[in-house]
Image (tube, coloured by chain):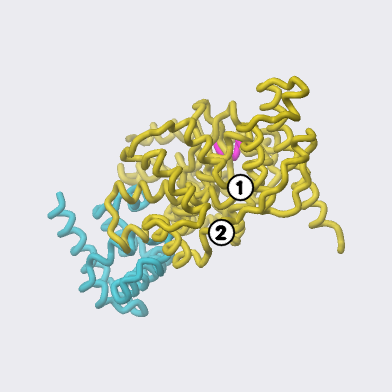
Chain colours: A yellow, B cyan
Amino acid sequence: MSPELIRLHLSQLKKAIIKSETNKYADNRKQEYHDNILTLFERIDSLDFSKCSISELIHYKYIIDFCFISIEFLDNSILTVIPHEIVYCLEKALSDWDDTNKYIIVISLSNDLNGFWFNSMLSLKEIYYDIFKADFSIFFKHRLIQITLPKYLSQDYLANVVLYHELGHFIDQRYGIIEKLSSAISLTNIEKIHYGEFFSDIFASQYIGEASNYYLHYIAHEAPDSESHPSTNSRIDLVEKFLNGKTDPILDHLKDATFKITGKELKDRRKIIKDDDFKAFIPTNIVSDEELHSIFEIGWRLWKNPLPEYSDKHIGEFDKYRIINSLMEKSISNYMVVNKWNKHVPH
Amino acid sequence: MYYAINQDNQNLEAYCSFLNEIVNTGNIYYANLFKEIISQTQNLIHTHDYYKVSSERFGIVKFFAHFPDVIKEIDVNNIKSEDFQKLSSCFESKFCTAS
């Protein structure tokens, strides 16, 4: 670690920042966050690193990394790139659990076909924001929830059910649900990790029922218990119990801790729309947020089952895939427009 | 503030740095943060209710709760530099034992 290497890192960041200067965001909060990153960069850039100790240099390296990651996610969340419809659905689910307006969902696209991730660095590592406030007098009003999804599946509404699970990880960590539950009932490290996965599965199923199970079963086909995940079968089994109102010791712990910590219930929040419109090749009219989330369940149901309305018209699997995805996207998009319109029309 | 990097690992050395930072720089923001953490830790020691701890500070509060004797003695409305030093030396001795 040397001042020259910090300067190199800063020059790399500066290049990324210059490139991001023309970013246009649909959400003003992202612009505000972006502006704060620029101010932070200017402050760090003006420091004299030759007088810094090694630990101070390491400290600045981490802050530069923070700025870099922020820019990466902001770059992928501009008007022309971000998959608005799926982010909109996630924002609606988020608002059930957090009404502070503090968190912004941002996206990064990965080349990994199974690359669905949540990273808590920009949303929950509060210590960074403490440092920015205490040492640089820069106050960030918002935090970025980093969600990564595969580039080639960014408009795939069947695969993107996994993102509800990723949002579950954010909610868990936002409230420290599993962390606190683990302390309260003395879970082992592996149990704690497994409970975190179970929580996220249950969280997702509140909105999309078994839809995430379908994809999970495919990508993690009957995987046994591992250090990072519980077995696929136990995950699917727990979601089924939750949706069918059955009891289970793990489920009971999760429900109890969630309510005590957040004041909100883990419950079946679904209101499933009819699939008649999709069968008639038209987007469906969604009238509530609960119905909005159910679009994923409908899409999966139609994909998994034989559809005479499609096969009679000699529509092949690939076209069926494209049509279902397109109908899901249009249905969400129409709901977004109507909601926005209703917000601005005087009643 | 080296503390930033290691908070997740419950690193004793990092917590010592955090306390030293407050004492050395006298940064009012960090001092208030410390006050908030002590207050929550005292509450946790008293109630044993993990669910009431702020999720933003859970890691450090849970760690501080391992030192009930020192924490209980601190007056949150009148924190003195000896409190920092006492806690810091407590961490350091545990750090030395751990390593």
Give yes or no for contact between labels 1 and 2 (Cβ–Cβ under 8 Å).
Answer: no
Q: Amino acid at mark 1?
A: Leu
Position of the C terminus of chain A by quadrant: bottom right
Q: Which mark is residue A97?
A: 2
Q: Amino acid at mark 2?
A: Trp
Q: Of residues A166 and A346, which is closer to you in this image?
A: A166
Whether residue A274 is visible: yes
Q: Which mark is residue A300?
A: none
**Which residue is rendered at x = 69% and y = 50% of the image?**
A291
Tell me the quarter of the picture where residue B61 sits.
bottom left
Q: Which residues are magenta?
A: A72-76
Q: Of residues A311 and A167, which is closer to you in this image?
A: A311
Q: Is residue A321 above or below residue A242?
A: above
**Which residue is rendered at x = 18% and y = 55% of the image?**
B95
**C-alpha span from label 1 to label 2:** 11 Å
**Which residue is rendered at x = 51% and y = 51% of the image?**
A203
User: How many other residues sit within 10 Å of disc 2, few (<14), some (14-19) or many (≥20)?
Assistant: some
